[in-house]
Amino acid sequence: MDAKVGNIFNGMKENSPTRKSAQTPISEALEDLVADAPDIYDQTFQPSADSIQRWQTLFNYTPTEAAERIKSQKLNGSHLSLTTTQWELIKSEKEAEGHDRDSYEHWIETHPTPSTSSNSPPPLLPTAAKIQEIAHLAHLPPTHAAHPTPPPPPLFCRIDSTNLHALRTWLLTHDPSHNLTIARLTIAAKDLSPDSIYPTLGHDATLPHHRPPIPSLTAGQVSQHNYPVLYFFYGFLADPERLTRLLSLPDSQPPSLVPATISGGKLEYWRGEYKALIDGGEDDVVDGVAFRVEGEEEEEALRFFHTEMYEVVRCGIRMVGGREEVAGLTFRFARREHLER
């Protein structure tokens, strides 16, 4: 998980705690799967005296009731169970209360939580403010609406891996039958050098003739925090309806997309359908549209949309019918090894 980017989730989703979240490494998931697999074929299993005593104390069972319930749970492959990773998050706290892993799993199944009982109240994590309180964040975490979805769209909250750990621990204690809906965020890189043309479409900034001898030669190019800024789009984002949804623009004010071209690049395809802009020759021209991005918030939405598969680069944009190029930016495909050959 990229801690600089973080994760998003929308409250809780009613799932068994055994379900893996999207960011769990495959190796960790496989280890848990093997470690947590119930031995449902061991029909000779008998609970220990310590386990029987624990269940008597915690649940007020008779010795016979405790033994039967422990055995039933052990041999029932479909009972609710915590993964090893989830149990480690709360192990110290629950052992201090007298539980071991088996008894706490039984406690979860026999004690309805707010999200599983009838007449359920709202989820425990309904707002960004609640998440801020639980994770002890200094500032309110940013939220994002999921698009495209039917209204009202789910609201996602962006946090980093450390805060995600705190939320998981809190949730396992307060509502263990629910799991977070988690998705890993990746973002298109943007690193515009203030001292060179790097990165610029169709130009290798390391070549001697692309290294400006004096700072004034880079004065007209777009800087890292230059807003508003002109972007060149091709393919998916050249559609005003799609761009409206992505940027949450009002339907009454469709985006102004101006037909334009750029040189120094060419289009390839990846996954058979997605257009990918890569460096081309001086005579290569790509048709598309120009769009004015008003600020960092809009730009960030565009960068999240393109993911780490792309990067922001400088380019010269020429409006159709215009005589001069305008300094702008576009998204260049950054994983050429994935392109179709």
Image: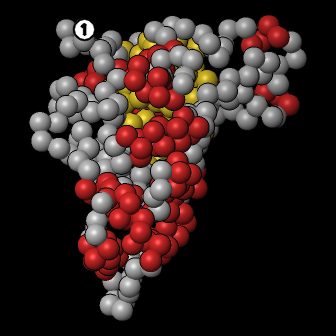
Q: Which quarter of the image is occupied by the N terminus?
A: top right
Between 303 and 280, the one lying in front of the other is 303
Where 294 falls versus 94 (above or below)? above
Identified by mark 1, the residue type is: Gln
Percent position (x, y) of residue 276? 47, 42
Judge whether residue 63 can be spotted in this image: yes
Percent position (x, y) of residue 149? 22, 33
Q: For the view shown, which residue lies furthest in the bottom direction? A: 44
Neighbours of disc 1 within 10 Å: few (<14), some (14-19), many (20+): few
> In the rendered image, which residue does mark 1 sit on?
253
Q: Which residue is drawn at 43% across and 35% down?
A: 8
Q: Residue at x 41, y 46 (%)?
A: 172
Q: Residue at x 54, y 22 (%)?
A: 137
Q: For the view shown, which residue lies furthest in the left direction? A: 119
Between 227 and 209, the one lying in front of the other is 227
Please tell me in which quadrant of the rendered image residue 192 appears. top right
Where 332 falls versus 223 (above or below)? below
Please tell me in which quadrant of the rendered image residue 256 appears. top left
Q: Residue at x 28, y 77 (%)?
A: 64
Between 208 and 297, the one lying in front of the other is 297
